[in-house]
Amino acid sequence: MKDPKTPPNEKVDQLQNHTTDNADQKLTTNQGLKINNNQDSLKAEERGPSLLEDFILREKITHFDHERIPERIVHARGSGAHGTFKLNKSLKEFTKAKFLSEEGKETPVFVRFSTVAGSAGSTDLARDVRGFAIKFYTEEGNYDLVGNNIPVFFIQDAMKFPDLVHAVKPEPDNAIPQAASAHDTFWDFISLMPESMHMIMWAMSDRAIPRSFRMMEGFGVHTFKFINDEGAVHFVKFHFKPKLGVHSVAWDEATKISGKDSDFHRRDLWEAIDNGAFPEWDFGVQIIPEEDEHKFDFDLLDPTKLIPEEEVPVQMVGTLTLNRNPDNFFAETEQIAFHPGHLVPGIDFTNDPLLQGRLFSYTDTQLSRLGSPNFHEIPINRSLNEVHNNQRDGHMRQQIVKGKVSYEPNSIGGGCPFQAMMKDGGFSSHNERIDGKKIRARSESFVDHYSQAKLFFNSQSAPEKQHLQNALIFELSKVTIPAIRERVVGQLAFINKDLAATVAKKVGVKVVELKQPNGSIPADADPATLQSPEKEPSTKSSEALSMANTVKDKIESRIIGFIMENGVKAADVKSLQSKLEAKGAVVQVIAGSLAPVKADDGTVFEPKHSLTSTASVCFDALYLCSGKQSSDNLLNEDNKPGTLLFVNEAYKHCKAIYFGNETDEIFKASHVNDKKHDDPAIITSDNKDSDAAFIKAIANHRVWEFEKERNNPA
Ligand code: HDE
């Protein structure tokens, strides 16, 4: 284990049976034969042809030729970690799931975060939804909660999923663009699918460009069912709220991070865990008694709707902690196979038609991705409890099942393995009464596409609304067909007239009034009755939907760039560094070059970066270290462009910048000199308690409310 603080975990122990360590070992073939020359192939004479009999070369090259597997059809780009789920408050009243019943119980988990549209090698900072998939290795078998960082989805029915994915993926003729929704086919589809408008509001918001996986919420999205020991049913929505708050970066920053460090989120997760700054989420549930199913003005089965927290509060009942990096990316993060149908007793599906389709898709996709129905035997996918059944054989079977019998009922094997009674933990689906006709249609209760889109937009702070508008303008400006831009603007007009008008102006179209939202309407239905009505949301505005209301009191794991050069005042640097580190922040020294920096008192600081090897977008906040000589050196001919670019960019992206003693010349030369108002994230030695002011500004994340001023230098 890398970190001594990482607590033991049963799943990690199980994985140890499958790990190998090459330290102090001799090189061998896959058959265990020791190899004494790994440099040259076997030839007829030194300059002659290679021999077919060279089984060592053949084995090496054959394995290499086959070492790729298909990437995930969606969510290909991902990063994962091990951890623990701890239940703080029993949910026994609602569910018989053991991992949710016993207070204090800890369950090992593996979590994989992902973007959706891009390939496995694409940038982490794409504007996209993020996957948030959790495998709970419970004593009753694996339970998978395969969710996202956004609580709703684009479509209502699984039938439209391949269309949605084909529309957003690179266009089929030229395979452009990678990991981006800003193109014709995506917006063509969206413009014809009014049901996607709520999700579009989220996807165009800053939620789609998170600062870190550790600063995202997680949602189960669909409504699920809890079943308790008495068989009573409650509907449930799952929530994960990050202890560090929900934070995002600026879009300009996201595009720059993509160039400077396209592994930004992967690296951030890895380093935080490696440094012992274990990411944590509070786990919460919204619970609705079965008899209240129809009390809402939307359908609980409709995955384009959320339940406002004002209508059903989230009860916080557990903690999710990630505390161990994988040993091997491919073996763990790549081979993990999630499936919303991996259930434990006490949890069941609802008839949400999107969820129902997912129940087919996930096993099916593992068959082509992992190559065999035995994917459950891959170490990361194994349950902690033993597997006993009569399934047999198949590619790459690992388990050696003893005895003659692989059928049931049997007498030869004494009837084993036995069916489990419900009282012994046997799973039984909820006996829901179904009484109706077979029909290929959409429920009328699903035909309200704009009210919650309005709720989301109305709940945003002014800077968030501005960002959302800018995102729509950016995306639609990449759409080459004016009619598509016009249709999207027409949809926006159903949500907010001003938003539609501004976007229309910027993308060069008129706001035309759409009479009939197209798409998602059965061919034989009377369109008039199915038209999405003009409807106001039941809750007008919801605090939980705005990131402006998130936690803003922590600087743990924030990366603070200390910019310095020779002559820096060591005492000031050391004092601030120790205050920041005491609160869990990470200090990294940036200088004109990687040469050690000599401070005024002879202390030597080792730079981690030079002004040219990194950029301000890779830091949460900057400290221009005290000292006239250091400041002069940072403004010499060589360093000045780098220093000012750092400061100006951080300023533009609304970050906290602290000008230490005697750094006025840097202040004056930068755009910060143009600041007109009292900006709390610009700290100078004039501030009363400047170190504390800096810490507060970092915890606040960004001063988005000063964005306009900071982007209009005189
Ligand atoms: Fe998925 N989804 N999905 N999805 N999904 C996959 O499964 C699918 C949906 C989500 O880190 C695939 O193993 C269908 C909603 C996550 O490994 C595939 C439909 C939500 C991940 C698949 C949906 C998700 C996937 C691709 C509509 C949020 C990554 C590879 C009917 C609640 C899991 C794989 C990981 C992955 C199908 C809709 C979340 C093809 C058919 C809604 C987080 O099976």
Image: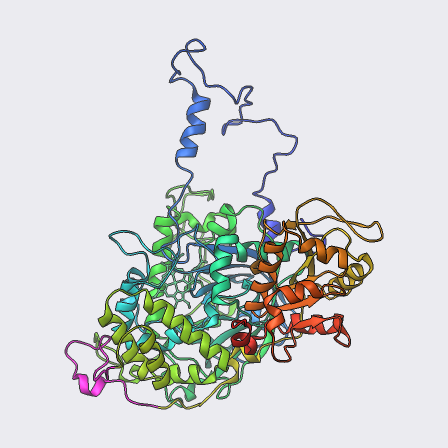
Q: Position of residue 396 (x, y in %)?
A: 41, 41
**Most prominent secondary structure in the magenta stretch?**
loop
Q: Which residue is found at the position 52% from the left and 53% from the top?
A: 260
| Nearer to the camera, 464 or 365 | 464
Q: Quadrant of residue 479?
A: bottom left
For the view shown, which residue lies furthest in the top direction? 45
| Nearer to the camera, 157 or 625 | 625
Q: For residue 395: magenta?
A: no
Image quarter for ligand 1: bottom left
On screen, residue 224 versus residue 35, left or right, reads left
- Which range is magenta? 512-535
Reply above or below: 660 against 604. Answer: below
Q: Position of residue 312 (x, y in %)?
A: 50, 86
Q: Is residue 587 visible?
A: yes
| Nearer to the camera, 677 or 54 | 677
Reply above or below: 357 against 329. Answer: below
Q: Which residue is found at the position 25% from the left and 78% from the top?
A: 442
Q: Position of residue 203 (x, y in %)?
A: 41, 70
